[in-house]
Image: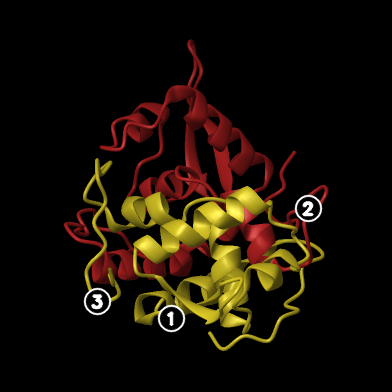
Chain colours: A red, B yellow
């Protein structure tokens, strides 16, 4: 099923607030790092795992599944026997660029010893 | 101690990436809702607890402490016997406006049944 063009539906919404609902999908320490990696050109499981934050494999699998179900990323096979998948951002995912850009700006301006390392088109 | 003007220091940084470091401070389902409430004019413990998401009291206390320690909010007593505190955004906190604004935009555009309810000056 392709949810790319459908609005995301959240069961048991905490409130109608769009910030609360966005946090229900993206509010943790890892999900937006996977999105960051996709913006940086990464697309495979092993590429995500090679990032310096060392995302645990169970968390990575869970986040890729959730992002796919919500139509934020799209999963397509790029190899058979064994089948392997590549992931890319949908329009919904690409529209997260400004969120990442503002987080990066805030981090650079307010947190010691951060630096923007990865070239991204946000 | 007043950390308002000092850059935030993160022990055991996962990487130098400003997005990863911002998520170490703000990456959960609740912290940015407290920031949202402060932008909306709320300032006291009971006002934060009255928000529709019903933040658990132990999480609220933990987040207010962490945000104060990192100089993102400032805690001042507004009443004695019993002493009660009010919180407000510092310049570091106010500079989170664009992050909230982009999250709200993304939620409104991509999640069903959200609506911007609270008047905020982001």
State the image coordinates of residue A98 (x, y, percent, origin top left): 45, 70
What distance separates the C-alpha of mark 3 from that of mark 2? 41 Å
Instruction: Look at the picture and state if A102 lies above or below B90.
Output: above
Residue B64 in sight from this viewpoint: yes
Q: Which of the two residues, A87 or A11, is positioned nearer the viewer here?
A: A11
Q: Residue furthest front?
A: B81
Q: Dot 2 falls on which chain?
A: A
What distance separates the C-alpha of mark 3 from that of mark 1? 13 Å
> Does label 2 lie on the same chain as label 3?
no
Label 3 SS: loop
State the image coordinates of residue A101 (x, y, percent, origin top left): 38, 67
Q: Which numbered mark, 3 or 1, is in the foreground of this view?
A: 3
Disc nearer the start of the sequence (3/1): 3
| Circle 1 residues within 10 Å: few <14, some 14–19, many ≥20 | some
Badge number at residue A9: 2
Q: Which residue is mark 1?
A: B94
Instruction: Look at the picture and state if A20 lies above or below A40.
Output: below
Instruction: Look at the picture and state if A22 lies above or below A53.
Output: below
Q: Which residue is mark 3?
A: B5
């Amino acid at each position: 099923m392709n949810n790319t063009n459908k609005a995301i539906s959240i069961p048991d919404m905490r409130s109608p607030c769009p910030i609360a609902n966005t946090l229900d999908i993206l509010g943790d320490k890892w999900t937006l790092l996977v999105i960051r990696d996709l913006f940086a050109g990464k697309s495979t499981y092993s590429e995500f795992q090679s990032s310096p934050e060392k995302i645990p494999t169970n968390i990575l699998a869970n986040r890729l599944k959730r992002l796919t179900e919500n139509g934020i990323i799209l999963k397509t096979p790029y190899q058979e026997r064994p089948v392997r998948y590549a992931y890319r951002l949908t329009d919904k995912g690409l529209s997260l660029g400004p969120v990442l850009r503002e987080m990066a700006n805030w981090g650079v301006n307010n947190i010691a010893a951060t630096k923007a390392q990865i070239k991204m088109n946000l």
